[in-house]
Amino acid sequence: MEKRHKKEHEDGCKHAEPWLDGSFYKSELARLHTELVKMQYWVKQSGCRVALCFEGRDAAGKGGVIKRIIEPLNPRGIRLVALAKPSDVERTQWYFQRYVAHLPAAGEILVFDRSWYNRAVVERVMGFCTNEEYWEFLASCPEFERMLVRSGILLLKYWLSVSDSEQERRFQERARNPLKRWKLSDIDIQARAKWVDFSKAKDLMFEHTDIPEARWYQVEADDKRRARLNCIRHILEHIPYEDAVPDPIRLIPRPPEDQNYHRPPRRAHSLVPDYYGDVPKAR
């Protein structure tokens, strides 16, 4: 029987929503992965430039969505950019300068795990930028993105939304689990008490930067499986790709071994021990 949870949207409204079935999720993700591969071949063949920006509240699941997008793709054609805090030199540069250096080339897909929108939310709420810098960003950002789109870059922006209660549950899990504790930064802990401030910053950001040339798309992310599938499918629907997967490769027979060459014995090499040699093998 399918479990249900209470979904609390950022507007405070609650409704019951079923968790997505695990078996369906796996089969649908496999199907979407096939489509992503087709899309990447088309991007390379057409010379299209794709930039995907992922923003959202802490613990909203950006990393999980991004991982499922990148997973089946050729790493030579897709790049993940997750910039650390700016250096002393970068702080003196034009704000967008360090992001421009990472924009995609022809045939490339670029994924920003947090982007220039750091200024509109995190920097604003945490006091890492001045009031003047903040308002200058809101004025400049739409023009910056219009330039990107006019240059031919296909820009898609996603905001992952998570309810207050679900975010807190994930924070508590990260605090307990040593394998996830790295996800809980000092900034995350400080920002935990600023839910309302982040809501205000996000709403104002949407008001100024949700433009026809580069719309914001919000992903409801309390159910991680549902969020991943919805986001990938939305990307596929907004990139006009065709099936550009090349025909199957016909491999010619391998040449016979050189009978005059004798390879050194295996004992001549330093082998990694088979630590699991005693584990029963699958039938």
Image (tube, rainbow, N blue to C red):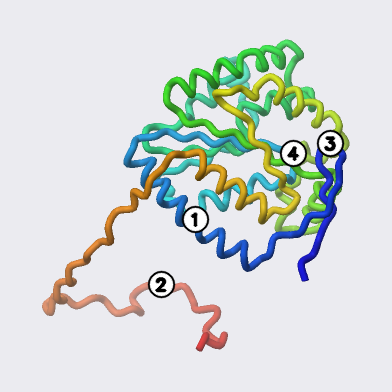
Can residue 83 be seen at all in this image of the molecule?
no
Which corner quadrant holds the N terminus?
Answer: bottom right
Label 1 and label 2: CA atoms lie apart by 38 Å
**Residue 189 higher or lower than 196, as above or below:** below
Whichever of labels 4 and 1 marks the residue nearer the N terminus, that label is: 1
Residue 204 coordinates in the image, percent (x, y): 75, 22
**Residue 154 higher or lower than 143, as above or below:** below
Q: Nearer the viewer, residue 38 or 70?
A: 38
Label 4 and label 2: CA atoms lie apart by 48 Å
Label 2 and label 3: CA atoms lie apart by 61 Å
Quarter of the image for residue 9 reads: top right
Residue 124 coordinates in the image, percent (x, y): 76, 23
Whichever of labels 1 and 2 marks the residue nearer the N terminus, that label is: 1
Foreground label between 3 and 4: 3
* Residue that numbered label 1 is attached to: 33
Foreground label between 1 and 2: 1
Q: Nearer the viewer, residue 84 or 273?
A: 84
Residue 240 coordinates in the image, percent (x, y): 43, 39
* Residue that numbered label 3 is attached to: 11
* Residue that numbered label 4 is attached to: 57
- Res 270 label: 2
Judged from the image, the secondary structure of the residue bearing numbered disc 1 is helix
Foreground label between 4 and 2: 4
The type of residue carrying mark 2 is Ser
Judged from the image, the secondary structure of the residue bearing numbered disc 3 is loop
Residue occupying the point 74% across, 39% down: 57
Label 4 and label 1: CA atoms lie apart by 26 Å
